[in-house]
């Protein structure tokens, strides 16, 4: 009994995880129209493709008409010359159908690839514009699923489903017109049988819609869990959670397999039933048509043969369209989820009249700033302080006191709920984020390195920097040997997130990156908290060089990094409770002095 509720709760949380995803609809012509709008830059290719679709729709019924005409005419008259010419015309037409089919497929593949290329780039650019709050609440696996499987589903939709379906529908229309011309009475019988196929399609399409939606959501959960497991592998192995994680992933994969099986079973029942219906209808038409021909109600047997050839062309696309509908629903699911992400407006963005921040000296001021990640629950309360150019400010306080929130506001990763953050008198709300970040440098506790070489990661600070400038930045920090002693020096590959380097080497690369950028405002968020004492001594000297002449904000637990700060702000529950220098705050005997004594004694 004690485990039943937690298990139900975990299942509920897992299901709720995807509730913010778009709900699928069987076919949404607004989505199709929007997807088709991405073909506008390739109008010439698209128009040639549409022409090929029209020709392809006409050619197959034309082949059937020629065959019926030869049987009715030259064959019935025993005209060998007419049969030969008919066979020759049939062969030429058959060759033309293959040529048109080649270009139809080629143009569809090229158009689909172009559309997918534009969609993928648009999605990536849109994600890059999202504020930091969006990344904090969005799972990595969800983003990967949109960029990967959803876009690939759209590729199939454009390259195969859309134009193949148009060919099949066009073929049915042309065949229907020919059937009407051959024998309009039999054609009316075909129309009378059509509602049966319609209701079969409708019933199974609804079932497929539900099962496909569940399948796509389950795949999103599998992708998200896989991404988290890879990113968090150190925690997994550190706490020996491999078996538990494997069990959780097994359950998710089993769910996904179950939904896949449901889709296949529904589809496996739908297509044979649809095909059987077609054959039954042909049998009914054969009985009625034969009776009409023998009783003299039809024109002649030759027209009846032509009618049944066209009936075959009319009914055969129905099975193809049924199979295409299954894939079309998957593509609709991908389109709906992808466009929902593209339509997600950033929580905030630079206002239209925002201006670039001019070159700054580095004065930072908080004027009555209140802020909360949830506006109803502030984490900073009415902060007021000013920092002059070139000063170093240390932010001190317990976890959750608001240190990182201050850093986020200075970096314009978030906007204050109330009050203003000013840089050289410019309200950050009124300046562009890019112009601000171009004059800032950030070194974080969890220093992030991109997959590539050491030099490439340092050059992130200034992409156009030469090798000599990269080397000079490290030399200036007086830590050149720490990187030159690597197996391949500055060409050494750092591995994913820098896993092939030590913590000290990763930190030095981040210092060199910041120094190369030559920022006016520098932020260090607990930048040396994970470094061993011996390496820290060298990095502290490098840090002093990095801080020189810049307005700097330092968040640190080790007091050795903030003893020489020009201003120490002591925070508690989002409020500044003490401010001053290291010496004056020690003399005051307040919260900072108690923190200092605790760290000094290791308590």
Image: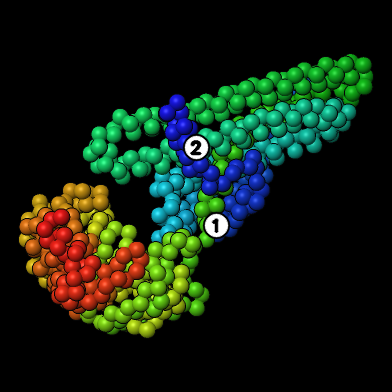
Does residue 294 sit above or below 107 in this rendering?
A: above
**Residue under the image location 25 percent in, 42 percent down:** 234
**First along the sequence among labels 1 and 2:** 2
Say whether residue 125 is visible. Answer: no
The crowd level at tag 2 (other Cα within 10 Å; few <14, some 14-19, many 20+) is few
Does residue 431 sit above or below 195 in this rendering?
A: below
Q: Tag on residue 37?
A: none
Left or right of 333? Residue 508 is: left
Left or right of 454? Residue 380 is: right
Does residue 270 sit above or below 290 in this rendering?
A: below
Residue 553 percent across, percent down from the top left? 25, 71
The crowd level at tag 1 (other Cα within 10 Å; few <14, some 14-19, many 20+) is few
Out of 570 and 506, give the one closest to the viewer: 570
Residue 327 percent across, percent down from the top left? 57, 36
Quadrant position of the C terminus in the picture: bottom left
Q: CA distance from mark 1 to mark 2?
A: 27 Å
Q: Pointer 1 and pointer 2: residues touching (CB < 8 Å)?
A: no
Out of 248 and 7, give the one closest to the viewer: 7
Quadrant position of the N terminus in the picture: top left
Q: Tag on residue 343?
A: 1
Instruction: Indicate the quadrant where residue 245 lies.
Output: top left
**Residue under the image location 60 percent in, 34 percent down:** 210
List the single residue furthest toward the front: 589
Residue under label 2, please give it: 12
Residue 106 percent across, percent down from the top left? 52, 44
Q: Secondary structure under badge 2?
A: helix
**Residue under the image location 45 percent in, 61 percent down:** 377
Instruction: Indicate the quadrant where residue 485 lies.
Output: bottom left
Q: Secondary structure under badge 1?
A: loop
Residue 475 percent across, percent down from the top left? 10, 68
């Amino acid at each position: 009994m004690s485990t039943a509720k937690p298990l139900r709760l975990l299942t509920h949380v897992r299901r709720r995880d995807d509730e913010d995803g778009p709900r699928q609809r069987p076919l949404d012509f607004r989505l199709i129209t929007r997807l088709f709008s991405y073909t506008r830059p390739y109008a010439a290719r698209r128009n040639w493709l549409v022409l090929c679709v029209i020709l392809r729709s006409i050619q197959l019924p034309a082949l059937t008409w020629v065959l019926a005409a030869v049987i009715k005419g030259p064959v019935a008259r025993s005209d060998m010359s007419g049969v030969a010419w008919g066979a020759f015309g049939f062969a030429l037409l058959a060759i033309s159908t293959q040529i048109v089919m080649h270009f139809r497929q080629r143009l569809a593949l090229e158009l689909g690839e172009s559309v997918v290329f534009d969609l993928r780039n648009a999605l990536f650019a849109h994600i890059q514009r999202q504020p930091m709050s969006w990344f904090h609440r969005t799972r990595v696996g969800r983003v990967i699923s949109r960029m990967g499987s959803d876009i690939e589903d759209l590729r199939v939709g454009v390259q195969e489903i859309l134009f193949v379906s148009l060919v099949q529908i066009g073929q049915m229309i042309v065949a229907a017109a020919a059937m009407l011309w051959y024998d309009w009475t039999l054609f009316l019988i075909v129309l009378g049988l059509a509602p049966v196929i319609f209701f079969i399609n409708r019933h199974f399409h609804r079932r497929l819609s539900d099962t496909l939606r569940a399948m796509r959501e389950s795949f999103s959960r599998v992708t998200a869990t896989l991404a988290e497991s890879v990113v968090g592998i150190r925690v997994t192995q550190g706490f020996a959670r491999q078996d538990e994680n494997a069990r959780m992933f097994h359950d998710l994969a089993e769910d996904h397999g179950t939904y896949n099986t449901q889709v296949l079973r529904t589809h496996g029942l739908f297509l044979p039933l649809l095909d059987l219906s077609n054959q039954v209808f042909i049998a009914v038409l054969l009985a009625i048509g034969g009776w009409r021909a023998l009783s003299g109600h039809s024109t002649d047997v030759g027209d009846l043969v032509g009618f049944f050839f066209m009936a075959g062309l009319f009914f055969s696309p129905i099975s193809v369209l049924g199979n295409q509908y299954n894939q079309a629903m998957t593509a609709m699911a991908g389109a709906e989820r992808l466009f929902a992400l593209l339509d997600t407006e950033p929580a905030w963005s630079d206002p239209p009249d925002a201006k670039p921040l001019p070159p700054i000296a580095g004065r930072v001021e908080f004027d009555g700033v209140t802020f909360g990640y949830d506006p109803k629950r502030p984490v900073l309360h009415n902060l007021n302080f000013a920092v002059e150019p070139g000063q170093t400010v240390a932010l001190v306080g317990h976890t959750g006191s608001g240190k990182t929130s201050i850093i986020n506001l200075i970096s314009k990763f978030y906007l204050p709920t109330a009050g203003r953050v000013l840089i050289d008198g410019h309200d950050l709300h009124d300046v562009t984020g890019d112009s601000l970040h171009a004059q800032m440098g950030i070194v974080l506790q969890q220093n992030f390195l991109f997959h590539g070489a050491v030099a490439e990661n340092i050059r992130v600070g200034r992409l156009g920097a030469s090798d000599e400038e990269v080397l000079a930045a490290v030399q200036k920090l007086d830590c050149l040997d720490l990187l030159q002693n690597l197996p391949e020096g500055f060409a050494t590959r750092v591995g994913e997130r820098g896993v092939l380097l030590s913590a000290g080497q990763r930190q030095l690369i981040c210092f060199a990156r910041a120094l190369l950028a030559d920022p006016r405002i520098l932020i260090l968020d607990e930048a040396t908290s994970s470094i061993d004492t011996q390496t820290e001594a060298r990095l502290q000297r490098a840090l002093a060089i990095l801080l020189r002449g810049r307005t700097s904000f330092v968040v640190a637990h080790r007091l050795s990094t903030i003893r020489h700060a020009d201003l120490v702000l002591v925070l508690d529950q989002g409020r500044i409770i003490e401010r001053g220098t290291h010496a004056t705050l020690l003399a005051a005997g307040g919260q900072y002095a108690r923190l200092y004594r605790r760290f000094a004694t290791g308590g």
